[in-house]
Image (cartoon, helix red, strand yellow):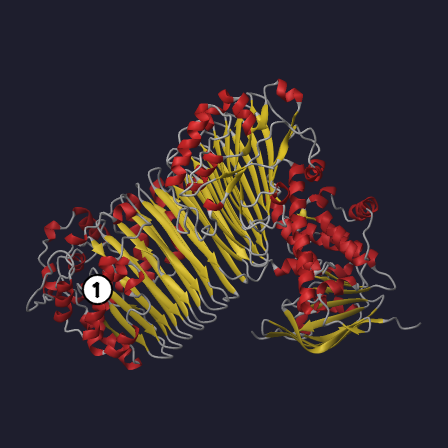
Amino acid sequence: MAAEVTKPFDLRAVGDDYKYGFHDKEDYSFKSGKGLTAEIVNKLSAMKNEPEWMLKFRLRALDIFLKKPMPTWGNTELLNDIDFQNIHYFVRATDRQERDWNEVPEGIKRTFDRLGIPEAERKFLAGVTAQYESEVVYHSIREDLEKQGVIFLDMDTALKEHEDIIREHFGTIIPPADNKFAALNSAVWSGGSFVWVPAGVRVEIPLQAYFRINTENMGQFERTLIIAEPGSYVHYIEGCTAPVYSSDSLHSAVVELIAKPGAHIRYTTIQNWSKNVYNLVTKRAVAHEDARVEWVDGNLGSKLTMKYPSIFLVGPRAHGEVLSIAFAGSSQHQDAGAKMVHVAPDTTSIIVSKSISKDGGRASYRGLIKVYPQATGVKSSVRCDALLLDEKSRSDTYPTMEIDESKVTIEHEATVSKVGEEQLFYLMSRGLTQAEAITMIVNGFLEPFTKELPLEYAVELNRLIALEMEGSVG
Amino acid sequence: MAEQKTVSTATQVDDPTKRREEPTWMKEARLASWESYLSTQLPGIRDDGWHRTDISGLNLADLRAVDFHSPEASASVSPWVIPALDSLSSHSGVLIQEAGTPAYLKLDSELADKGVVFCDIETALKTHGDKVRRYLGEPADLNDDKFTNLIKSWFNCGLFLFVPPGVEIANPLLSFTSVNYRSSGIADGAVLPRLLVVASEGSRVTLLHSVTAPLSQAVDTALHAGLVDIHIEQAAHVSYLELTEFGPAVYSVTNTRAWLNKDASFTSLTAALGGRLVKGEISTYLNGQGASAEVAGVVLGADNEKYSFNTIEEHNAPDTRSNIHFRTALKDSSTSIYQGIIRVDREAQRTDAYQSNKNLLLGSGAKADSIPKLEILADDVRCSHGATVGPVDQEQVFYLMSRGLTAAEAEELIVLGFFTTVMAKFDHKPAIAWVGSAIASKLIAHDRDSRKQSAGEQK
Amino acid sequence: MTEKEEILVIKDLHVRVDDKEILKGVSLTVRRGEIHALMGRNGSGKSTLSYTLMGHPRYKVTAGQIWYKGSDLTALAADERSRSGIYLAFQYPVAIPGVSVSNFLRAAVKSRRGTDVPVKEFRKELRNRMSSLNIKDDFLSRYINDGFSGGEKKRLEILQMELLAPDLAVLDETDSGLDIDALKTVASGINSMTGPDVAILLITHYQRLLNYITPDYVHVMQDGQIVMSGGSELAHQLEARGYDWVAPAPVV
């Protein structure tokens, strides 16, 4: 969460006093015992004062989670290493403050340094401080949103204030039974965002989870729901380029998007979890008639990421796009991709995926294009490119196209290559070092992704890639 | 009349070695594979390589292995082979195997003198035991699936082709296998060919293999399951073409495997033109530096035919190259599933691999799945794949129609062209023309049938 | 002199492409033996008219009529139009991989002439025409327009036109992308086609093809209509004064 990347406000301008000013004491703290039981779910729900239906939802999901087997595909070796007994399923914010700055790995600290992350932020990102309030800045934005009738709250608050809307939509796009980790999230979710945009309203500035960040946003099991009413537009940005240190080994979010007729949702994610983290995320959108949904998804950190943003194109002429990058460094496996499910006629989709594997890292693209019978006039194109930077690394491409309708046009293309020697030679002949040249080529390779980011994120991402190329990121 | 043997039932397990005059080691290998067969399950639609390929309608227990055994060889060519022999008039040998009829075998004496072996598998076991034992006598492989085990234990036809070091055979060897269920009186028969090709160092050979089960059959279920093993030694070259044309009752499961040594090369063309469910797996193991493979496949589906093909390219050595081109055109409600994987091992630097799968959906009920996969563990590689699914390009149709061709003629020409570009990768021109005319006949016959049908419906 | 047959009569033709009206009331009469040049800016609707005449399914006639040899053309499919003697030389001929030029030409000639031409005779005819168009022999075994240069594509279009001997030839920007030698070859190919019974509609953006082929009539298209017609001198006036002289560029 670097200040440079978060115009319109600059934390350093707030003054030094602020550094000490955000210590928010909770009255009590709760830390669940290890292992997941109905008792924990009951307690969690009670503590949040949740309505009865949500508790039931959680308990049903818990049941599914306990019964569902682990996925038998993907990196099963790493998946089976997850010890569900050894995870705290709910930790109050105050508990996290107990971590000492000295415990934060040197690599992470050095990266903060190199990225020029302000000190207050570093501690937050490293999980040393729990709260990182930007109320002052957020306040004016919130007023603008309120005038437009936009709701933008953390999920826990939203459940209290807008129970009806949430009850109607929550878990409808990703039911708990979808997969083991969606079930887990449904049972123990905490935090995340709720966004509701009224019909016809265009939210001009991107909504950033950062505006109201606290520990629960960075939590293990966040839950986000975005509803764009007919003809509305919203761009939501999740995460940041700076590495987020977490001692929690398992992060499993669920994100549901609903784009009603003619609505347009763009969801941008840049995630850079520290390299001990399992990041197993379920993201899915439904696009109704003439709606448009775009996932812009950047995956840099974590030990294992499994994330396949999906779009169900259920209304005629709906359009879906997934634009993603994955950077797999040493002992990392980025298993990412996209799914497009064409249910209605004349729906269109585009997937562009870029991956880079380095220092023994493994990047896998896993995707699905599904066209249902009677979905005539569907057009879909998929492009996957992978760069391998050394002989220890690995790249996989696992696309699936299931086409059950004949009047469609589907295209898939993928390439795997190393940095072109001619390109390298050309740049080095102009005086760039090999490392600089490679970095430049890699940034060029990622350009279709970075150009879709808000400028400050793009700048930050390029800088981060440069650090990754030096191998100096913790 | 041919003798019938039970392939399998839980209650009535037969012995695959009975009534066979084979070396003991072969009998042992058959029995070992039979044991494995009995303990393996039929592949399901979620099993690797069987994505959405449902073979549960095939009841193996009801099948009987057709008997190809014949005490003497035939002196004459069966009439149904003559048109093919006409279009492939330059050839070095012919093997015809037909259930219930003596086999026909011819090999240029000049080649026989050089030590080339080309014969049916039964003869090979009798007279070339020393040459085939290495390959056929191997213990059962735990990775073998149900069908491979079935073939290894019950194979009832097939061939052995051995080319000695340095021998280059310019003209192709031809193999025709036919099951005319009606005339042989065999219902519910299983044809289980096992083909073994060994191309010694520096040799060159082309094998054209065709399997047909005539199209109008009053048979409930029949099975063709073939295992084709091709060993290509250093700097040797093998071209292999397989053409299958089955009627609507026939299930076909073929497993083709080629092992390539240093600087070896392999060219293959698989053409599938009919059957109830046609499943094929073509694996190429590039185990020696500098090995290269050109694998092409063409599938023309009609009616309710189902096709499912896998190609596997394993690059296990440096400087290896592979090109896969798999094309499918589907009329009516025919469906196709293509899965392809390129695996590049860490040692296989400077691999150059390409995989392309294109599907033309011609019929309104046609469906195509494509799963082109890459697993790349070396960095100095050029690997790519492309896949498309869609109808015939209407701009192409319009262009041809603007020159006076009818819509049907335009489509026929475009579909033939669609296949031609891929067949052109095969290095034997008369064979391409032979397959091309088989495709054209199916296209034209089918169009005529459907015109008749729609004319009938209008009445 | 008796008036020649009106081979093509277009009356108040309106055409839509993908819900967008491109032609907004075109009227044009072409008699046998005449050469008409249709000029205009890019996007004025010239190519739309050519595709409509050939019967491209994406181009929908919403109003007006097209009469060809005295009967209504609009209901005919492209192949029926071709067999009745209409020929379109495409601006961007499509590639059809796998289909050899020789197979294609034989099929096309057979459909136009209604009978199979003996191979030997056909080869001979082909070689004569190919050599006059500077087309190499290996052309025949190549796939239709696949990997062809711009000039090769245009020459194949002219070769087909000669073989199919149309009554009405529509040439859509046949001069575009050609160097001066190729332009001369193509122009002489077109000139060899002309005759008392053949009508030619030349669609072109520039005047340069008209240095080699003299049209009887020149029409200027603008925003889906013919806004000016005249004799061959009109082409020279356009060359000198630009399209703005006829009508200002549409405001986009």
Residue C40, given in percent of the width and then of the height, sits at: 68, 69
Residue A362 as seen in the image, left or right of residue C203: left
Q: Horizontal and vertical percent for residue A337?
A: 37, 55
One can see residue B445 in this view? yes
Query: Which residue is pictured at 35% across the width and 37% down the height?
Result: A391
Q: Quick one: quadrant of the C terminus of chain B? A: bottom right
Vertical arrangement, residue B148 with respect to residue A201, above or below: above
- Camera-side residue of B101 and A345: B101
Q: How many marks?
A: 1
Q: Chain of mark 1?
A: A
Q: Splitting the image into 4 quarters, where does residue B270 fall?
A: top right
- Amino acid carrying mark 1 in the image: Ala
Residue A34 against residue B122 in the figure, above or below: below
Q: Is residue A217 visible?
A: no
For the N terminus of chain B, the image quarter is top right
Q: Residue at x 14, y 67 (%)?
A: A42
Residue extending furthest toward the right: C1
**Farthest residue toward the top?**
B113
Q: Residues within 10 Å of mark 1 (few under 14, many from 20)?
A: many
* Above-or-below relation of A37 to B179: below
Q: Which element carries disc 1, helix, strand or loop?
A: helix
In the visual, does A93 lie left or right of A392?
left
Residue C228 image position (x, y, % from top left): 73, 75
Q: Nearer the viewer, residue A411 or B279?
A: B279
- For the point 27% across and 53% down, the residue is A70
Residue at label 1?
A187
- Measured as percent of width and height from the top left, residue B412 is found at 66, 54
